[in-house]
Image (cartoon, rainbow, N blue to C red):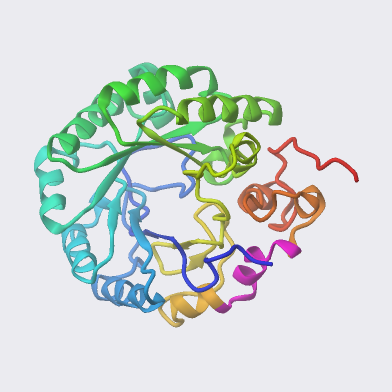
Amino acid sequence: MTASGYDAAPMMVYWEVTRACGLACRHCRAEAVPNRDPLELSTEEGRKLLRSLTRFGDRIPHLVLTGGDPFRRPDLDELVAYAAGLGLFVSVTPSATPLVTRDTIIRLKHAGVRSLAYSIDGSRAERHDRIRGIEGTFERTVNAVQWALAESIPVQVNTLVSSETADDLDAVYDLVCRLGAQRWALFFLIATGRGQALTEVSPAESERLLSWLLDLSSKPSPVIKTTEAHHYRRLDAARRAPGRTSTHAWGIRDGAGIMFVSHTGDVYPSGFLPMSVGNVRGRDPVTLYRQSPLFRQLRDVRSLKGKCGRCEFKVICGGSRARAYAATGDPLESDPLCPYEQAEA
């Protein structure tokens, strides 16, 4: 009983091209550092990885080049162009540093980038910059979004959801709408990396926020998605009228539709679930995704434990495996952010 459609190929592959970054974000999963790691995948190793992704078959995954700050790699344009030439849909998630200019955005466009994602974690400079750790990042981010949209590059705005940001989310939403971004992705905090210093919202607060987001999702734009808040799909399913199609990626979660490759080539079920199943320097990433015991377990909802294992929504939801791991050390345990308990028969 697996996540239908994601056994053979992921929908999304994230490649952390570097951990180098000029910011000091309080929630950074990667615990980014100022300088590049000499053990990063080389340009040629990166090309080999990109070629391997085309072997997933007819459903070639969407590739996201992330970091750290991807602009810290001098071969970023080359990697984007190579991936685009292979037929991959390529997105990039730059950091808001002086490396982001209109010219560098135009270069990515010419290389073949299909979308960009920037983080806005506060509706005002003082709130956003407090999370990012560097003054001036709010203004740079707003400029970067506007430059990308002026070049007709679709933009996704990513926003952290934690106790420190929850009361500002409605104002962030208004800002995202004013900027004209096509997508708003809300990342519910996982206590990993530097994020261990922040506080998750409570299960009751997460339920309230997800209900609010569902109300907003009926509007034409931006498209709203959540990351590591899979119970959004349960609330959506409860509201759906017969025949209504959901816009949410049901069944996708860590290891099921998602694969993450680190800057040194280690393969994980997601960037928030630090359990490596092998390294692309010596193993085929297609085989690792399809055959590694961890990935197979994560895709089989019969493996889930506790209330997630009992839940009637486990196929479309399945809970955050990363949060279960962060909370218990077991990625198959229940997601503690979800307050739902299936009623006894």
What residue do we see at 29% from left, 29% from top?
A: 137
Q: Is residue 96 above or below residue 12?
A: above
Q: Is residue 87 above or below residue 199?
A: below
- Magenta residues: mostly which secondary structure? helix
Q: Position of residue 284 (x, y in %)?
A: 44, 81
Q: Position of residue 261 (x, y in %)?
A: 43, 64
What residue do we see at 42% from left, 69% from top?
A: 265
Which residue lies most toward the front here? 243
What residue do we see at 70% from left, 45% from top?
A: 335
Nearer to the camera, 15 or 233: 233
Range of the magenta residues? 291-302
Rendered image quadrant of residue 178: top left
What residue do we see at 67% from left, 68% from top?
A: 297
> From the image, which quarter does the N terminus lie in?
bottom right
Nearer to the camera, 43 or 38: 43
Rendered image quadrant of residue 196: top right
Q: Total number of numbered labels?
A: 0
Which residue lies most toward the right here? 345
Q: Is residue 297 magenta?
A: yes
